[in-house]
Image (spheres, grey):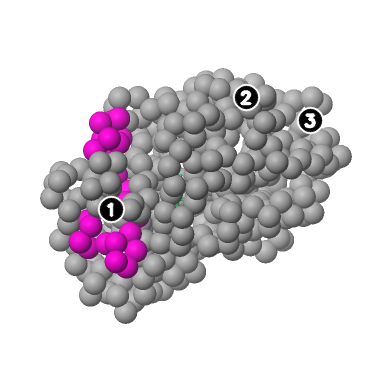
């Protein structure tokens, strides 16, 4: 059954992180994200734009996302008769780049469709291969090695199934050696967020000694070919993040053997339709995938949980409990993780959690309604 979106509300919210998050491109202490509410005859669907506060992970940031959603993506779906949320990707497809802004709108429309149909979101997108999502954590660069070791210890005690640590030149080999000495048998991986070049090949080769599950995006954010050259030299599998923005790029990377694993992020690829296509391409090629995170609020987190129920999301992802990020989340109940390091997938219509409207209002720093 089709539907028409008759109202879109954009909100920019601000949420302080309980602990700063540092990557090779910088430190984040407070998130500013754009939340998209799309409504049809009084029923609302919700989406989150996962862009950061600065254009450092990719070209997008909160302010660019606001303008792209308001001036380009939202008007393309507003007051248009839709047969299926799968049409949104094409309707905004002529916008160059800005996948996170497009994806925030697209995800909201999927959530709306799920609610209108009375289905859980995971079912609407063709997921449901598992009712329990295996969870890992992404741990940022810390002020000291002992602090990192303490954090890893505490996440393992919470039950998380794998540890990802951020690395950069100067915080890599020696730090990983300490981690491996302390935790010789954990599932461990490293994420460089594009901090190296092919000239660092010999240096990165030394990581093989630590039998990591994978090294994520060691080379440039827009580079596939160099990753293929590096992968040929490394035993450690390369996992691609930043450089894969579409299913087609994933196909090219697989053909070139640029990596053995793919991190799929809903925002980076522009929403569920493309995420599903990327998942299918990898699945067909025997490449496992996992769901990445962008320090999302509960809304984006709930979407990630739905995405993680697709069949080929076989590795623990970066989707973890709300309380690791926020002293209070904008959804209820908050996302919780079981002692065995999993998230249970609910069967309520839509993304499966309630919006905490009072709290949402209190963290909203700008709002605009489109008709
Ligand atoms: O590269 O996966 C990344 C956070 C911000 C930007 C990029 C990345 C990350 C994470 C955090 O690793 C994942 C999370 O806990 O949400
Ligand atoms: Mg990454």
Q: Is residue 300 above or below residue 54?
A: above
- Give coordinates of residue 101: x percent, y percent: 65, 51
Few, some or many residues within 10 Å of mark 1 (<14, 14–19, 20+): few
- Give coordinates of residue 368: x percent, y percent: 79, 42
Q: Is residue 253 above or below residue 13?
A: below
Residue 117 appears in view: no
Few, some or many residues within 10 Å of mark 3 (<14, 14–19, 20+): some
Mark with earlier residue (2, 3): 3
* Residue at 30 percent of width and 25 percent of height: 339
Residue 322 appears in view: yes
Instruction: State the residue in front, 122 or 25.
Output: 25
Q: Is mark 3 within 8 Å of ligand 1?
A: no
Few, some or many residues within 10 Å of mark 2 (<14, 14–19, 20+): some
Residue 286 located within the stretch drawn in magenta: no
- Quarter of the picture holding the N terminus: top right
Direction from residue 35 to residue 222 in the image, left or right: left
């Amino acid at each position: 059954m089709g539907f028409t979106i008759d109202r879109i509300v954009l909100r920019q919210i601000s949420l302080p992180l309980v602990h700063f998050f540092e990557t090779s491109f910088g430190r984040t202490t407070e998130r500013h994200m754009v939340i998209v509410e799309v409504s049809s005859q009084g029923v609302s669907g919700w989406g989150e734009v996962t862009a950061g506060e600065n254009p450092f992970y990719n070209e997008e940031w909160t302010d660019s996302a606001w303008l792209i959603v308001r001036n380009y993506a939202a008007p393309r779906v507003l007051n248009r008769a839709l047969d299926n949320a799968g049409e949104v990707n094409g309707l905004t497809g002529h916008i160059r780049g800005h996948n996170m802004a497009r994806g925030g709108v697209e995800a909201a429309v999927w959530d709306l469709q799920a609610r209108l149909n009375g289905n859980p979101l995971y079912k609407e997108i063709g997921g449901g291969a598992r009712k329990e999502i295996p969870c890992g954590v992404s741990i940022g660069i810390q002020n000291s090695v002992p602090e990192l070791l303490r954090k890893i210890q505490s996440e393992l005690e919470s039950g998380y199934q794998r540890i990802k640590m951020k690395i950069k030149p100067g915080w890599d080999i020696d730090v990983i050696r300490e981690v491996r000495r302390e935790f010789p048998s954990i599932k461990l991986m490293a994420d460089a967020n594009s901090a190296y070049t092919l000239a660092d090949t010999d240096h990165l080769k030394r990581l093989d000694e630590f039998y990591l599950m994978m090294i994520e995006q060691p080379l440039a954010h827009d580079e596939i070919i160099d990753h293929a050259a590096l992968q040929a030299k490394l035993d450690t599998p390369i996992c691609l993040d930043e450089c894969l923005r579409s299913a087609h790029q994933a196909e090219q990377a697989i053909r070139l053997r640029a990596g053995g694993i793919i991190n799929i992020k809903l925002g980076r690829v522009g929403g569920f339709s493309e995420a599903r296509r990327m998942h299918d391409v990898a699945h067909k090629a025997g490449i496992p995938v996992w769901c990445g995170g962008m320090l999302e609020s509960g809304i984006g987190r709930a979407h990630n949980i739905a995405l993680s129920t697709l069949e080929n999301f076989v590795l623990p992802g970066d989707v973890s409990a709300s309380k690791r990020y926020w002293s209070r989340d904008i959804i209820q109940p908050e996302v919780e993780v079981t002692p065995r390091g999993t998230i249970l997938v609910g069967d309520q219509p839509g993304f499966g959690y309630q919006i905490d409207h009072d709290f949402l209002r209190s963290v909203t720093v700008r709002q605009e309604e489109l008709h």
